[in-house]
Image (spheres, rainbow, N blue to C red):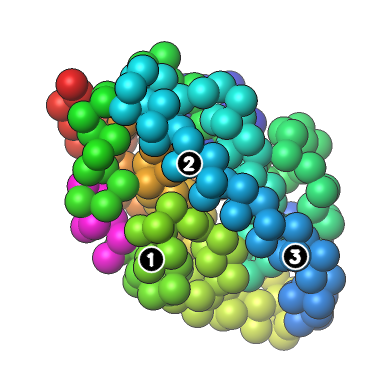
Amino acid sequence: MSTSPSVYPLQLEGELGTQLSRWRWLVKWFLLIPHWIVLFFLWIGVVASTVIAFFAILFTGRYPRGLFDFAVGVLRWTWRVAFYSYSALGTDRYPAFSLADDAAYPARLDVEYPAHLSRGLVLVKWWLLALPHYLVVAVFAGVGWSAASSRTDSIYGLVGGGLIGLLVMFAGIALLFTGRYPETLYSFVMGMNRWVFRVAAYSLLMTDSYPPFRLDMGGSEPPAGGASGEASAPVPVPTG
Protein backbone atom coordinates (compact mmCIF):
# COMPACT_ATOMS: atom_id res chain seq x y z
CA MET A 1 0.00 0.00 0.00
CA SER A 2 1.21 3.47 -0.80
CA THR A 3 2.59 5.41 2.16
CA SER A 4 0.96 8.62 0.92
CA PRO A 5 -2.33 9.40 2.67
CA SER A 6 -5.38 8.93 0.47
CA VAL A 7 -7.81 11.73 -0.33
CA TYR A 8 -10.60 9.36 0.78
CA PRO A 9 -10.78 7.08 3.86
CA LEU A 10 -10.96 3.98 1.65
CA GLN A 11 -7.65 3.28 -0.08
CA LEU A 12 -7.69 0.89 -3.02
CA GLU A 13 -4.64 -0.02 -5.06
CA GLY A 14 -3.65 -2.58 -7.64
CA GLU A 15 -0.35 -3.30 -9.37
CA LEU A 16 -0.78 -4.56 -12.92
CA GLY A 17 1.07 -7.81 -13.56
CA THR A 18 3.92 -7.66 -16.07
CA GLN A 19 3.53 -11.20 -17.43
CA LEU A 20 -0.16 -12.00 -17.62
CA SER A 21 -1.30 -15.24 -19.21
CA ARG A 22 -2.99 -14.94 -22.57
CA TRP A 23 -5.65 -17.53 -21.76
CA ARG A 24 -5.98 -17.98 -17.99
CA TRP A 25 -8.67 -15.30 -17.74
CA LEU A 26 -10.94 -17.64 -19.68
CA VAL A 27 -11.05 -20.11 -16.76
CA LYS A 28 -10.76 -17.82 -13.76
CA TRP A 29 -14.52 -18.06 -13.20
CA PHE A 30 -14.00 -21.77 -12.50
CA LEU A 31 -10.87 -21.32 -10.40
CA LEU A 32 -12.67 -18.82 -8.17
CA ILE A 33 -15.73 -20.92 -7.34
CA PRO A 34 -14.42 -21.67 -3.81
CA HIS A 35 -13.88 -17.94 -3.20
CA TRP A 36 -17.35 -17.01 -4.40
CA ILE A 37 -18.94 -19.60 -2.11
CA VAL A 38 -17.05 -18.28 0.92
CA LEU A 39 -17.69 -14.64 0.00
CA PHE A 40 -21.41 -15.30 -0.35
CA PHE A 41 -21.58 -16.27 3.33
CA LEU A 42 -19.15 -13.55 4.40
CA TRP A 43 -21.37 -10.91 2.80
CA ILE A 44 -24.37 -12.28 4.66
CA GLY A 45 -22.29 -11.66 7.78
CA VAL A 46 -21.48 -8.13 6.62
CA VAL A 47 -25.18 -7.34 6.13
CA ALA A 48 -25.96 -8.60 9.64
CA SER A 49 -23.03 -6.76 11.21
CA THR A 50 -23.98 -3.54 9.39
CA VAL A 51 -27.46 -3.68 10.93
CA ILE A 52 -25.85 -4.00 14.38
CA ALA A 53 -23.42 -1.19 13.55
CA PHE A 54 -26.35 0.99 12.43
CA PHE A 55 -27.88 0.93 15.90
CA ALA A 56 -24.50 1.29 17.60
CA ILE A 57 -23.77 4.43 15.56
CA LEU A 58 -27.30 5.76 16.11
CA PHE A 59 -26.97 5.55 19.91
CA THR A 60 -23.22 6.00 20.49
CA GLY A 61 -21.77 7.65 17.37
CA ARG A 62 -19.21 4.87 17.06
CA TYR A 63 -18.80 1.87 14.75
CA PRO A 64 -17.84 -1.16 16.91
CA ARG A 65 -14.20 -1.82 16.07
CA GLY A 66 -14.55 -5.57 15.75
CA LEU A 67 -17.43 -5.27 13.30
CA PHE A 68 -15.57 -2.56 11.40
CA ASP A 69 -12.46 -4.72 11.03
CA PHE A 70 -14.61 -7.61 9.82
CA ALA A 71 -16.26 -5.44 7.14
CA VAL A 72 -12.86 -4.12 6.03
CA GLY A 73 -11.59 -7.67 5.80
CA VAL A 74 -14.49 -8.74 3.60
CA LEU A 75 -14.03 -5.70 1.35
CA ARG A 76 -10.32 -6.51 1.16
CA TRP A 77 -10.99 -10.15 0.25
CA THR A 78 -13.61 -9.06 -2.29
CA TRP A 79 -11.17 -6.64 -3.94
CA ARG A 80 -8.44 -9.28 -4.22
CA VAL A 81 -10.88 -11.64 -5.95
CA ALA A 82 -12.25 -8.83 -8.12
CA PHE A 83 -8.74 -7.74 -9.15
CA TYR A 84 -7.80 -11.31 -10.05
CA SER A 85 -11.03 -11.88 -11.95
CA TYR A 86 -13.43 -9.91 -14.08
CA SER A 87 -13.32 -6.51 -12.44
CA ALA A 88 -9.70 -5.98 -13.50
CA LEU A 89 -7.80 -9.14 -14.65
CA GLY A 90 -4.82 -7.34 -13.14
CA THR A 91 -2.91 -10.38 -11.88
CA ASP A 92 -2.61 -14.13 -12.30
CA ARG A 93 -1.59 -14.65 -8.65
CA TYR A 94 -4.35 -16.58 -6.94
CA PRO A 95 -5.87 -14.57 -4.03
CA ALA A 96 -5.56 -15.79 -0.46
CA PHE A 97 -8.50 -17.01 1.61
CA SER A 98 -8.01 -14.35 4.26
CA LEU A 99 -9.57 -11.24 5.77
CA ALA A 100 -6.14 -9.90 6.67
CA ASP A 101 -4.07 -7.51 4.62
CA ASP A 102 -1.58 -9.29 2.37
CA ALA A 103 1.38 -7.00 1.80
CA ALA A 104 2.75 -9.30 -0.90
CA TYR A 105 -0.43 -9.35 -3.01
CA PRO A 106 -0.67 -6.81 -5.86
CA ALA A 107 -4.23 -5.73 -4.92
CA ARG A 108 -4.71 -4.06 -1.53
CA LEU A 109 -7.48 -2.24 0.27
CA ASP A 110 -7.82 -0.49 3.60
CA VAL A 111 -10.35 1.78 5.29
CA GLU A 112 -9.45 4.35 7.92
CA TYR A 113 -11.28 3.71 11.19
CA PRO A 114 -13.47 6.71 12.10
CA ALA A 115 -13.15 8.06 15.64
CA HIS A 116 -16.72 9.34 15.46
CA LEU A 117 -19.65 8.99 13.08
CA SER A 118 -22.71 11.21 12.80
CA ARG A 119 -25.77 9.77 14.51
CA GLY A 120 -28.00 11.78 12.19
CA LEU A 121 -26.35 10.87 8.90
CA VAL A 122 -26.60 7.16 9.63
CA LEU A 123 -30.35 7.45 9.06
CA VAL A 124 -30.09 8.75 5.50
CA LYS A 125 -26.65 8.35 3.99
CA TRP A 126 -26.92 4.68 2.91
CA TRP A 127 -30.13 5.19 0.91
CA LEU A 128 -30.91 8.86 0.29
CA LEU A 129 -27.53 10.58 0.11
CA ALA A 130 -25.89 7.68 -1.73
CA LEU A 131 -28.67 7.42 -4.34
CA PRO A 132 -26.86 9.50 -7.03
CA HIS A 133 -23.81 7.28 -6.60
CA TYR A 134 -25.90 4.13 -6.96
CA LEU A 135 -26.97 5.37 -10.39
CA VAL A 136 -23.32 5.83 -11.42
CA VAL A 137 -22.36 2.45 -9.97
CA ALA A 138 -25.22 0.85 -11.89
CA VAL A 139 -23.44 1.96 -15.07
CA PHE A 140 -19.97 0.95 -13.88
CA ALA A 141 -20.69 -2.39 -12.22
CA GLY A 142 -24.16 -3.32 -13.45
CA VAL A 143 -27.70 -2.81 -12.24
CA GLY A 144 -27.48 -5.85 -9.95
CA TRP A 145 -24.68 -4.27 -7.91
CA SER A 146 -26.50 -0.97 -7.57
CA ALA A 147 -29.71 -2.61 -6.37
CA ALA A 148 -27.78 -4.77 -3.91
CA SER A 149 -25.80 -1.78 -2.63
CA SER A 150 -28.97 -0.04 -1.53
CA ARG A 151 -29.42 -3.01 0.82
CA THR A 152 -25.78 -2.78 2.01
CA ASP A 153 -24.70 -5.87 0.08
CA SER A 154 -21.82 -5.36 -2.37
CA ILE A 155 -20.97 -8.91 -3.40
CA TYR A 156 -22.21 -8.30 -6.95
CA GLY A 157 -19.38 -5.82 -7.45
CA LEU A 158 -16.87 -8.59 -8.13
CA VAL A 159 -18.69 -10.25 -11.01
CA GLY A 160 -17.51 -7.64 -13.49
CA GLY A 161 -20.81 -6.42 -14.90
CA GLY A 162 -21.61 -3.09 -16.49
CA LEU A 163 -19.00 -0.88 -18.09
CA ILE A 164 -16.23 -2.40 -15.98
CA GLY A 165 -17.04 -5.87 -17.25
CA LEU A 166 -17.21 -4.67 -20.84
CA LEU A 167 -13.82 -2.95 -20.71
CA VAL A 168 -12.23 -5.88 -18.88
CA MET A 169 -13.55 -8.16 -21.62
CA PHE A 170 -11.75 -5.95 -24.17
CA ALA A 171 -8.61 -6.25 -22.02
CA GLY A 172 -8.99 -10.03 -22.00
CA ILE A 173 -9.29 -10.10 -25.78
CA ALA A 174 -6.19 -7.92 -26.05
CA LEU A 175 -4.34 -10.34 -23.78
CA LEU A 176 -5.49 -13.30 -25.82
CA PHE A 177 -4.21 -11.93 -29.13
CA THR A 178 -1.31 -9.66 -28.11
CA GLY A 179 -0.23 -10.80 -24.67
CA ARG A 180 -0.47 -7.19 -23.44
CA TYR A 181 -2.95 -5.34 -21.22
CA PRO A 182 -3.52 -1.77 -22.53
CA GLU A 183 -2.30 0.47 -19.70
CA THR A 184 -4.76 3.28 -20.46
CA LEU A 185 -7.63 0.82 -20.25
CA TYR A 186 -6.27 -0.54 -16.98
CA SER A 187 -6.03 2.95 -15.49
CA PHE A 188 -9.66 3.66 -16.39
CA VAL A 189 -10.85 0.32 -14.99
CA MET A 190 -9.03 1.03 -11.73
CA GLY A 191 -10.70 4.43 -11.46
CA MET A 192 -14.15 2.88 -11.81
CA ASN A 193 -13.35 0.14 -9.28
CA ARG A 194 -12.09 2.76 -6.84
CA TRP A 195 -15.38 4.67 -7.22
CA VAL A 196 -17.42 1.48 -6.66
CA PHE A 197 -15.59 0.48 -3.49
CA ARG A 198 -15.74 4.01 -2.06
CA VAL A 199 -19.50 3.91 -2.46
CA ALA A 200 -19.54 0.46 -0.86
CA ALA A 201 -17.70 1.76 2.21
CA TYR A 202 -20.05 4.74 2.47
CA SER A 203 -23.20 2.63 2.10
CA LEU A 204 -21.85 0.19 4.70
CA LEU A 205 -21.76 3.12 7.17
CA MET A 206 -17.97 2.94 7.50
CA THR A 207 -17.35 6.63 6.86
CA ASP A 208 -19.18 9.95 6.81
CA SER A 209 -16.95 11.27 4.02
CA TYR A 210 -19.12 11.58 0.94
CA PRO A 211 -17.57 9.79 -2.08
CA PRO A 212 -16.27 12.30 -4.65
CA PHE A 213 -17.85 12.38 -8.09
CA ARG A 214 -14.61 11.78 -9.96
CA LEU A 215 -12.44 9.02 -11.40
CA ASP A 216 -9.14 8.72 -9.56
CA MET A 217 -7.51 6.60 -12.22
CA GLY A 218 -4.36 4.52 -12.01
CA GLY A 219 -3.13 1.71 -9.85
CA SER A 220 -2.20 3.92 -6.89
CA GLU A 221 -4.30 6.23 -4.76
CA PRO A 222 -3.83 9.96 -5.39
CA PRO A 223 -1.89 11.60 -2.52
CA ALA A 224 -3.72 13.96 -0.20
CA GLY A 225 -2.87 17.59 -0.85
CA GLY A 226 -1.70 16.92 -4.39
CA ALA A 227 -2.62 19.15 -7.28
CA SER A 228 -5.48 16.94 -8.42
CA GLY A 229 -6.60 16.30 -4.88
CA GLU A 230 -6.87 20.01 -4.09
CA ALA A 231 -8.77 20.69 -7.27
CA SER A 232 -11.39 18.02 -6.62
CA ALA A 233 -11.69 17.47 -2.90
CA PRO A 234 -14.47 15.19 -1.59
CA VAL A 235 -17.85 16.86 -1.26
CA PRO A 236 -18.25 17.94 2.41
CA VAL A 237 -21.26 16.61 4.26
CA PRO A 238 -22.37 18.23 7.51
CA THR A 239 -22.24 16.03 10.59
CA GLY A 240 -24.46 16.11 13.59
Residue 132 sits inside the magenta stretch: yes
In terms of image quadrants, where is residue 212?
top left
Give the x, y percent position of residue 185.
51, 66
- Mark 3 to mark 2 CA distance (whole Å): 20 Å
Q: Magenta stretch: dominant SS?
A: helix
Give the mark, 2 or 1, whose residue is nearer the N terminus.
2
Front of the two marks 2 and 1 = 2
Tell me which residue sits at (59%, 70%) in the image.
159
Q: Which residue does the numbered mark 3 point to in the structure image?
A: 37
Tell me which residue sits at (53%, 66%) in the image.
156
Tag count: 3
Q: Which residue does the numbered mark 1 point to in the structure image?
A: 146
Q: 81 or 131, which is in the foreground?
A: 131
Classify mark 3: helix, strand or loop.
Answer: helix
Q: Residues within 10 Å of mark 1 (few under 14, many from 20)?
A: many
Bounds of the magenta segment: 129-135
Q: Which residue does the numbered mark 2 point to in the structure image?
A: 50
Q: What's the mark number on residue 86?
A: none
In terms of image quadrants, where is residue 84?
bottom right
